[in-house]
Image (cartoon, coloured by chain):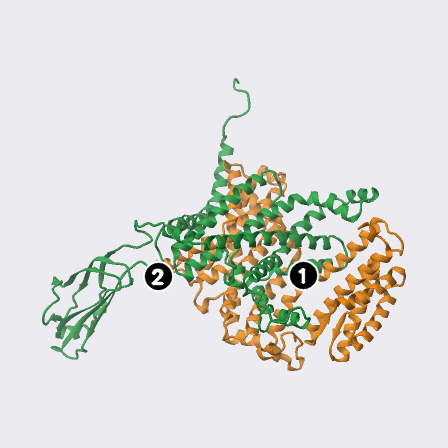
Chain colours: A green, B orange
Amino acid sequence: MSDIGPPRGAGPLARSEARLAWGLLTPTILAVSLVVILPLLAIFWISVKPVSLSDLRAPDTVVREDLRGRPAAAGDEATLRYRLRNSSPSSEITGVTLQDAWPEGLTLAGELDPRCEIAEGLLSCDLGDWEGGYRETLNIPVVTEQAWFDTDSDVEDTPVQVDGKASFVLTNNEFTLKNFVSVFDGGEFFNVLGVTLFYTVFGTVGALVMGLFASLLLNHSFKGQGILRGLYLFPYVAPVIAVAFAWILLFDPFSGSANALLVQMGVTDQAINFFGERPLALIMVTLFEIWRYFPLSFLFILARMQSISTDMYEAADMDGASPFQQFWYLSMPQLLGILSVLFLLRFIWTFNKFDDIFLLTGGNAGTRVLTVNVYEQAFAVSNIGAGAAVAVVIFACLLLFSVFFFKFMSKEEGL
Amino acid sequence: MKHLRFGYLTGPALGVLWTFVIAVTVAVAMSFATGEAFRPSLTWSVIFGIPTGLALVWGGTTLVASAVLSVVYFIALSLGIGPVLTGNVSSVARVAAAVFMGIGIGWPLKVFVEELTLGALTRHEFEEAVIRTLRGFGYIFFTAIVVIPFYVMVMTSLKNQAQLMQNPLDFSIDLSQGWGLFRSYVELITEFNFGSYMWTSFYISVLTVFITLLFAIPGAYAVARLRFRGQAAFSRSILLIYMVPMIVLALPIYIAFSMMGLRNSITGIVMIYPVTTIPVALYMLQGYFRGLPAEIEEAGLMDGLSRLQVIWKITLPLSLPALASVSLYVFMIAWNEFLLAFMLLDDPSKFTLTRGIASLNSSEIPRQHLMAGSVIATVPIMALFLGLEKFMTKGLTAGSVKG
């Protein structure tokens, strides 16, 4: 009994617990790394590749085989035809070879293509290199024998083997920094960045302020409070596509109700193109963002408000503090924690937002933010590489934010 | 502010403010309801608001104030003066507007200024009245901004293109057509295949919920309860993954799916949706699991249950409310998801509801169809949400600022 003292290191129980923990986590880790980590690495890889939308399919050889001439009886002449093609319009395939079993009951009648030979019932051809968009038809004149009709066979029964080496842009060793150059080139990038920051900062702050007001309204018990709380959450719960189209319709310059209302009330003479004019469109998408996400901040702030004990307010009342003073000196300091956490999280999320602007303006009229730029570059300009480069820039910003976030969050408890 | 603290100043000021707020509200509401021209006037609001405020500070009850003001505003509307100006509208509309104005101004304003006297006011009395007025304005403002887009959505879906172009404000519907009102909905379901889109959306969402829970429950339990090296780092990386924007992932996923032939397939969508929701679910669930008393589980362990049995027989039954809110939330994300469906699905026979609505957005398809599609997508999630609101709000606050 010499080693009395606390156990050191991991005992067998602790080890089996850790084993179980990893066992439980493995499926999640696998799934998440497959769909999050792997694509993230892929984005970095693609961002240094000269790849456009049309390059996405690896170049491949395409071959069709048929027998022309409709031979009806033994001794009829026919043509065995191979139609060959390079599937890619731009990439080369090198060292293409073709192999096919020679159909039984057919004999060569005439000259064979010099690149081909028939040996032991096997047709093999060496077709050399195919440049992008290459097409060729290989015709072999044949005569049918009785055996052809006896076996009732078809030339397509035996599969044609075509091999060739193709260099696929996503897997080869060709790298370029052009994507990044084109992203940062010109003033456009800084314009996009400025728009993103405007949208993010004002969208986040606006949603927080509106959420704060809404929760001040509902931090009283009265009849119908539950209904009103449910109602105020509608913008957040409804599908974004539905509410975005409702907004577009409401603010349509030709037949929108908002314009009709403004004209009728004498606020403006002409219809305003809310989502089509330069500074206005950005303000509108920011307002949409505020409208759609104030319910979320409202929910969190309300939950925090309801957990503040009422004793303090009673004491403040006794001391003669006015309602504004109570709000400013009592409620606000208590809400500061949740407000700053909400601000940070919502800031990141608004920065990442894509759907809303994409649906409302498609990034036109000065509303192109970074996320929409990814889509524009990749699919509208069909330059996948440039899109990936923008995505890398977004990811870098995100890392920056999250460093800040975790520094702050370790102090700030809560979420 | 100090020199405003007299009943004879505060009363009229609040009176003017409130009269104008109600005037705008009534004008907008009446315009939307009837399509007729109603417009608020600031000048007339000042002229009418000052005496109203003064009178209500001086005396009167809510009932008397409402009745008197209704009569006053009916006369004013008929004469073509007052805070709300209108042209030659039907007398029914005029009576409705006058009653709205009377009750809308008289009743709340009396409540706002109840404690005021005509003389000097304490800071408390003054601020109380101002805050009440602001709160009243807040209710109207928030309700209006939330309700108007949805109102426009529903009403547009019930009208036709020609009527809409003629008067964009006229949302009155012709009830005499009976079931003909729902023409756009019938056409969407019969001609545009929306029944099948709805079914696709539904079963994709349900599958997503199940797959998410299948992965997230063991993961969340491990993070919350079991001790292992790297636990803290793991909790953090969940949050970090939660912050990766979908558009960044969507691009490589699009490429990979194109190459593997998973694009345009429900399988691909069902594979990808849960992964976007697993971090959310993990985060929400581990928070809840941490809150459960560990003693019950330890008692189970002492009685000879294995860890997995403890999870199945003790932890899960105890966390049913949390599971319900997580399921609801995940269902909502999957049902509302747009970006991935838009990028990955091209074949109309495999569309989800959101993708189906996106395909309606063309100049050849009338807009009431677009709005009817939006209503079809919105109503189920709203119904689900309102029915289970308690779970939903709890779930939302439990761990998600995402959206």
Query: Which of B343/A255 is in front?
Result: A255
Residue occupying the point 47% across, 48% down: A395
Q: Position of residue A376 (x, y in %)?
A: 44, 59
Q: Is the C terminus of chain B in the top left, top right, bottom left or bottom right quadrant?
A: bottom right
Inspect the image, locate mark 1, and give the three-letter code of the amino acid beneath it: Leu
Query: Which class describes the residues within 10 Å of circle 1: few (<14), some (14-19), or many (20+)?
Result: some
Q: Which of the two discs, 1 and 2, sits closer to the camera?
A: 2
Residue B25 position within the rendered picture, expressed as x and y whole percent measured from the top left: 72, 67
The residue closer to the viewer here, B328 or A374, is A374
Question: For residue A248, what is the image quadrant?
Answer: bottom right
Q: Is residue B252 left or right of residue B186?
A: left
Marks 1 and 2 share the same chain: yes
Let me know if residue A145 appears in the view. yes
Q: Secondary structure at mark 1?
A: helix
Residue at the spot of label 2: A54
Residue type at tag 2:
Ser
Quarter of the image where one finds residue B106: bottom right
In this picture, residue A184 sits left or right of residue B134: left
Residue indicated by mark 1? A231
3D distance between C-alphas at marks 1 and 2: 47 Å
Q: Chain of mark 1?
A: A
Comes first in the chain, label 1 or label 2: 2
- Residue A31 shows in the view: no
